[in-house]
Image (cartoon, rainbow, N blue to C red):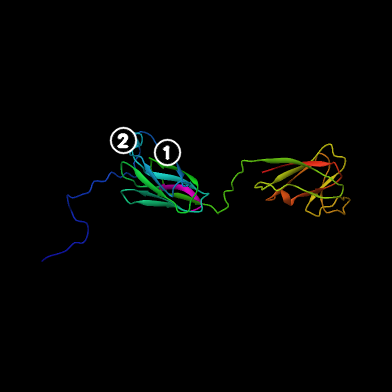
Amino acid sequence: MSSSNNGPQKTNAYVASNVFNGFAPVTSPKALPVNLDFTVSQTIDIDMSALHADGGFEFVQGIYCDNSQNASSITFSSTRLQFSITFPAYSQGFQTFMCENAPKIKVTSANTTQVITAHILNFPVATIITSFSAADPSPTPDVIDTGQLAIATTGTAVQLPNVTLLNGIVVTAATSNSATIYVGGSNVQNQGGGTGNGYPLAPGQSMSLSTANANTIWINGTAGNWVAYNGN
């Protein structure tokens, strides 16, 4: 009687594979920072063979990637093992990665023109991915715009300049002003007593506004009086 077995067969013809996953590094846990410059190319090759040969990096077991500001996904692939992981658009986190020694990793991202930060890890990690909306986390501007604006003609509203804002603006009436300044839209009036349409700023007083552009703000008051503003 003959029988067949479609399962794994005993054989001496095993293929050696220097792949590590779940191993505690002999030296110490290490994270190798890599700046992925997709402004130059949408395919980036990371060759760690020399670093591995020197004993500086025993093996690759995980990858951290901050893709939170990128509208395209990023894929890391083991060059010879054909194993790959993908970080979705607007995400960041850790993923387990299997890579042969000496490590060679190919990184690809379509339609990306940014520099993305990643870390190659020699220690095992659990896969943890955090996703963000397209506008979150909000970028922090590195430019602060300041200035001053004076009333040229009593009763004629004056517009703040065209300045794009992310975190809003603070408007302060000068301490030397002789009268109240009123803050509002393009039709803001130089009028108080509960009958005007502007927000009153006595000399030395300030107010903060959340707006995308400083030019949405107008001031009105007495000629020669002025305000200072600070926004970003």
**As drawn, is 133 to the left or to the right of 229?**
left
**As drawn, is 109 to the left or to the right of 172?**
left
If the image is split into quadrants, where does the C terminus sit?
top right
Q: Main secondary structure of the magenta part?
A: strand
Q: Residue at left 19%, top 56%? A: 9
**As drawn, is 151 to the left or to the right of 111?**
right
**As drawn, is 159 to the left or to the right of 115?**
right
Q: Secondary structure at mark 1?
A: strand
Q: Can you tell which mark lies on residue 31?
A: 1
Relative depth, front residue between 158 and 24:
158
- Identify the amino acid type marked 2: Ala
What is the residue that sits farthest to the left in this orientation? 1
Closer to viewer: mark 1 or mark 2: 2
Q: Secondary structure at mark 2?
A: helix
- Against 51, is 40 above or below? below
If the image is split into quadrants, where does the N terminus sit?
bottom left
- Residue named by callout 2: 53
Binning the other alpha carbons within 10 Å of mark 1 as few (below 14), some (14 to 19) or many (20 upward) gives some
For marks 1 and 2 on the same chain, the one whose residue lies earlier in the sequence: 1
Label 1 and label 2: CA atoms lie apart by: 17 Å
Q: Can you tell which mark lies on residue 204?
A: none
| Span highlighted in magenta in the image | 89-95
Q: Residue at left 86%, top 53%? A: 196
Q: In the image, residue 141 lies at what x, y percent?
A: 62, 43
Verify CB contact (< 8 Å) between mark 1 and mark 2: no
Q: In the image, residue 71 lies at what x, y percent?
A: 51, 53
93 part of magenta stretch: yes
Q: Residue at left 40%, top 51%? A: 85
132 part of magenta stretch: no
What is the residue that sits farthest to the right in this orientation? 193
Binning the other alpha carbons within 10 Å of mark 2 as few (below 14), some (14 to 19) or many (20 upward) gives few
